[in-house]
């Protein structure tokens, strides 16, 4: 199964959960909005059962923000916070792979840097932050 199909399946599952919850909540009242929710839910379920991907794509595109499921990073942890944790644990960062090593930094292993040594090397430090952050992911 290719990655696009996997993402579409995830979206379908999540939308199913959302629509089921909304229809359940909407069934407790009899407003026009309730009827709209039910009609939309039925239409959506018909699209899924028909496997008409073009119609399903159009339906999702008409949802707010094009049906895009996304995350707001206001509660996410920053790369710098991870570095603080690694520093307190006394671990080091491999300067070639940017992987955390459980070894203690030492003079014999020149590829595994302490957090202080990493921060003293501007190019390496910014490369690590770029690699560990979402800033340039999209």
Image (tube, grey):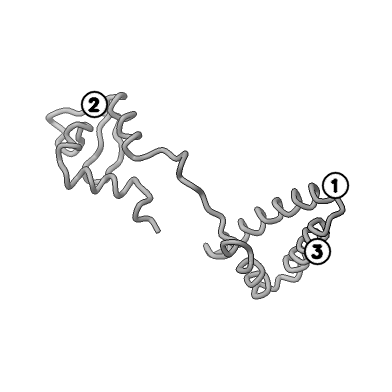
Going by the picture, which residue comes out furthest to the front? 31
Expressed as whole percent of the image width and height from the top left, the position of residue 34 reads: 81, 56
Q: Quadrant of residue 69?
A: bottom right
* Mark sitting earlier along the chain (3/1): 1
Q: Which numbered circle lies on residue 28? A: 1
Furthest residue in direction right, as rendered: 30
Kindly identify which residue carries mark 3. 39
- In percent of the image, x 80 and y 51: which residue is there? 26
In the image, is 76 to the left or to the right of 2?
left
Mark 2 lies on residue: 104
Which element carries disc 2, helix, strand or loop? Answer: loop
Distance between the alpha carbons at the discs numbered 2 and 1: 61 Å
Structural distance between the alpha carbons of marks 2 and 3: 62 Å
Q: Secondary structure at mark 1?
A: loop
**Which of pointers 2 and 3 indicates the residue nearer the eye?**
3
- In the picture, measured across the screen, residue 45 lies left or right of residue 88, that is right
Task: Residue 130: give its label.
Answer: none
Pointer 2 with pointer 3, Cβ within 8 A = no
- In the rendered image, residue 66, in percent from the top left (x then y), is placed at 58, 65
Find the residue positioned furthest to the left: 107
Classed neighbour count for the residue bearing mark 2: other residues with Cα under 10 Å, few (<14), some (14–19), many (≥20):
some
Q: Quadrant of residue 84?
A: top left
Q: Position of residue 109 (x, y in %)?
A: 16, 33
Q: CA distance from mark 3 to mark 1?
A: 15 Å
Quadrant of the rendering where the C terminus is positioned: bottom left
Q: Nearer the viewer, residue 56 or 10?
A: 56
Q: Residue at x 35, y 47 (%)?
A: 133
Which badge, 2 or 3, is on the more N-terminal residue? 3
Quick check: 9 above or below 94? below
Q: Residue at x 87, y 53 (%)?
A: 30
Placement of the N terminus among the 4 image quadrants: bottom right
Q: Is residue 14 above or below residue 47?
A: above
């Amino acid at each position: 199964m290719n990655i696009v199909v996997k993402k579409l399946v995830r979206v379908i599952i999540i939308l199913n959960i959302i629509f089921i919850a909304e229809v359940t909540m909407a069934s407790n009242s009899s407003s026009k909005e309730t009827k709209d929710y039910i009609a939309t839910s039925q239409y959506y379920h018909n699209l899924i059962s028909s496997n008409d991907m073009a119609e399903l794509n159009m339906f999702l595109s008409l949802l707010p923000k094009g049906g895009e499921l996304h995350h707001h990073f206001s509660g996410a942890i920053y790369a710098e916070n991870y570095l603080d944790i690694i520093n307190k644990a006394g671990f080091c960062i491999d300067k070639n792979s940017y992987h955390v090593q459980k070894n203690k930094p030492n003079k014999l292993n020149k590829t595994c840097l302490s957090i202080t040594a990493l921060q003293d090397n501007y190019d390496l430090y910014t490369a690590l932050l770029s690699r560990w952050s979402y800033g340039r992911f999209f």
